[in-house]
Amino acid sequence: MGRKRKAKPTFWQSPFEIVIDTREQKPYDFSGLVSDVKEGRVPIKVRTQIARLETGDYTVAGYQDQVVIERKSPSDLIKTLTHRRDAFFYELDRMRKIPCSLILVEGDIVPILLDPDLCLPLSQRKKIGRTIIAIQQDYATIQWSFAHTRNHAESYAWQWLKRWHRRHGNELEDLSVSELRAKSIDETTQGETDGPRV
C-alpha cells in the first residue's frame, strides 16, 4: 500500500499576536488574508487582542516599544492636520522614540485632497500637502505609506508587521534569553563570592 498523502493545512497560523488600541473605532480584524505559496495559499489566522496602547494603533504583542502603526482614514488625516495638530505632534514625538514606526493612510494623498465630500478649499489643500512634507522631513525616522483602499491598508499592515517580526522579533527574544542567562550567571557568581551568610 502506498503512503497516505499528508493532508493540506486548512489555514496558516500567524507566528505573532497583534495588539490593537482600545481607541480604534474601526479596527482591522485581519480576516480574508491569504498566505504565500510556500505556506500553502490558505487563509491566515491572525491572533489579536484589544489593549490600551500609549502610542499608535497596532503593534506586535510584547514589542510595543519597538514597533507601531498609526492608522489614518482620509477624514481622520484631514482632521488631524487641521483641527488636532497639537495632539498629532505629541503623537509624532512619541512615535519617533520607537525604532520602527509607520503612519498608514487609507487612501492616496491626491484623491484625498481632491475628495468633493471633504470640500477642501485650495488654500487648505496646499497647507495640508506642505504639512505632510514637513512632517516627513522633520520626523524622518517615521515611515509613511498611502494605501489605495482600506482593504489594501489592512493587508499592508499585516505584511509590515510580519516582516518586522521575522527580521527583529526572534533577535529580541534571543537577546532577552541571553540577558536572563547572563543575569543568572552573575547572581550565582556573586553568591559564591560572598560566601555563606552567618
Image: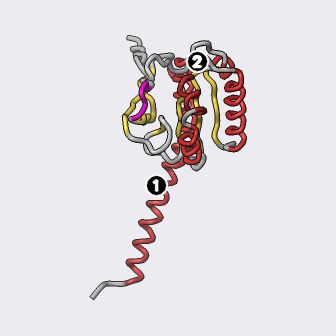
In the foreground, 37 or 14: 14
Is any part of residue 10 visible from this angle? yes
Q: Quadrant of the C terminus?
A: bottom left
Residue 133 horizontal side relative to residue 106, left or right: right
Residue 196 in the image: x percent, y percent?
31, 84
Range drawn in magenta: 23-27
Q: Quadrant of the N terminus?
A: top left
Colouring method of the image:
secondary structure
Write down the residue under mark 1. 177
Q: Is residue 196 magenta?
A: no
* Residue at x 67% of width, y 26% of height: 124
In the foreground, 145 or 93: 93
In the foreground, 110 or 39: 110
Among the 4 quarters of the image, the one containing residue 142: top right
Residue 50 in the image: x percent, y percent?
37, 35
Residue 122 horizontal side relative to residue 47, left or right: right
Q: Amino acid at mark 2?
A: Leu
Q: Is residue 24 magenta?
A: yes
Cα distance, mark 1 to mark 2?
Answer: 51 Å
Q: Residue furthest left?
A: 198
Q: Amino acid at mark 1?
A: Val
Q: Earlier in the sequence, mark 1 or mark 2?
A: 2
| Mark seen at residue 61 | none
Q: Residues within 10 Å of mark 2 (few under 14, many from 20)?
A: few
Write down the residue under mark 2. 118
Q: Secondary structure at mark 1?
A: helix
Q: What secondary structure prevails in the magenta region? A: loop
Residue 93 in the image: x percent, y percent?
58, 47
Note whether 45 is above or below 19 in the view shown. Answer: above
Q: Secondary structure at mark 2?
A: loop
Q: Residues within 10 Å of mark 1 (few under 14, many from 20)?
A: few
